[in-house]
Image: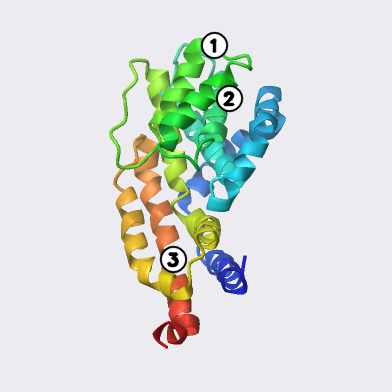
Amino acid sequence: MNCFIEDLARKSREFASRHQKPDFYARFHVEVSRSKHLYFTNPIIILLREAVEERLLLCEKVGHGIYHSSRVAWDCAALLDIELTQIGNIGVHKHRILILGLAAGILHDIARCEPNHAEVGAREAAKILRLFPFSEEEIGFICRAIRNHEAFRRPVPSLNPIGQLISDCLYDADKFRWGADNFTYTIWRMVDHQNLSPRDLIERFHWGIDGIRKIAQTFRTPTGRQFGPEIIENGIAIGKDIYRYLLRHYGESCLA
């Protein structure tokens, strides 16, 4: 990263530290902690992460590599935990469903640098998952969720309620990243990759904020609809801080 981007990335983390964390992470800290514990200790998930680490590192340049996929995985499993608890007796083992959610989160952007990445990623994920102890039904749940994780595209519904829930939770977990993560991490990798100047960033900032705000209306689970908009607004507040900093420190050079 050049000095301009490094400065903005550092300031973005400083701005984020001044904002209160969204209520989701306070209210459901137990579920999020349980999800992280599974991510780091479950043998299948450990082996899966190791198997795709190199591919995810290639996507790090656009902010959708290991950092992004790990957080999507954590929140996907946490959302599944929350929703399954509210549903009650579902007739299947909750622990296994959380593993499927973690796997979906890890693999959802496996083809992020390719066109039509959700569809391509679903096909690639199926090949990878068949090397692990997952049933064909479970692989189908995960791959449908990956196909359905893009915003502003009509998802393909699942006839199985568990498959549908995994799909919806993966979508919401991925869109939670449009909050603070977008402004403290993802955007700076993308700006660096595209070699954008301060002028470019200032000119595109309002357009980007408007696009992010639209995400708040697209959450699919009850928990996502309740807590997701606040996560988005938290990110936008950080973004506005960054924009003001951009204007103060780089605005004159853009007008020169």
**Mark 1 crowdedness (10 Å alpha carbons): few <14, some 14-19, many ≥20:** few
Q: Which mark is residue 99?
A: 2
* Spot occupied by residue 30 in the image (x, y as percentages of width and height): 58, 38
Relative to 63, residue 220 above or below: above
Q: Quadrant of the N terminus?
A: bottom right
* Spot occupied by residue 11 in the image (x, y as percentages of width and height): 57, 71
- Label 2 and label 3: CA atoms lie apart by 33 Å
Label 3 residue SS:
helix
| Tag 2: amino acid | Ile
Out of 67 and 114, give the one closest to the viewer: 114
| Image quadrant in which you'd find residue 170 | top left
Q: Residue at x 51, y 36 (%)?
A: 111
Closer to the chain start, of discs 2 and 3, is 2
Q: To which residue does mark 3 refer?
A: 239
Relative to 64, residue 249 above or below: below
Q: Quadrant of the C terminus?
A: bottom left
| Tag 1: amino acid | Ser
* Spot occupied by residue 16 in the image (x, y as percentages of width and height): 53, 64
**Mark 2 crowdedness (10 Å alpha carbons): few <14, some 14-19, many ≥20:** many
Q: Which mark is residue 193?
A: none
Assess whether mark 3 and mark 2 are in contact (beta carbons under 8 angstroms).
no
In this rendering, does residue 86 appear at all? no
Label 1 residue SS:
loop
Out of 117 and 182, give the one closest to the viewer: 117
Out of 37 and 31, give the one closest to the viewer: 37
Nearer to us of marks 2 and 1 is 1
Q: To which residue does mark 1 refer?
A: 135
Q: Residue at x 70, y 32 (%)?
A: 50
In this rendering, does residue 200 appear at all? yes
| Image quadrant in which you'd find residue 165 | top left
| Tag 3: amino acid | Gly
Assess whether mark 1 and mark 2 are in contact (beta carbons under 8 angstroms).
no
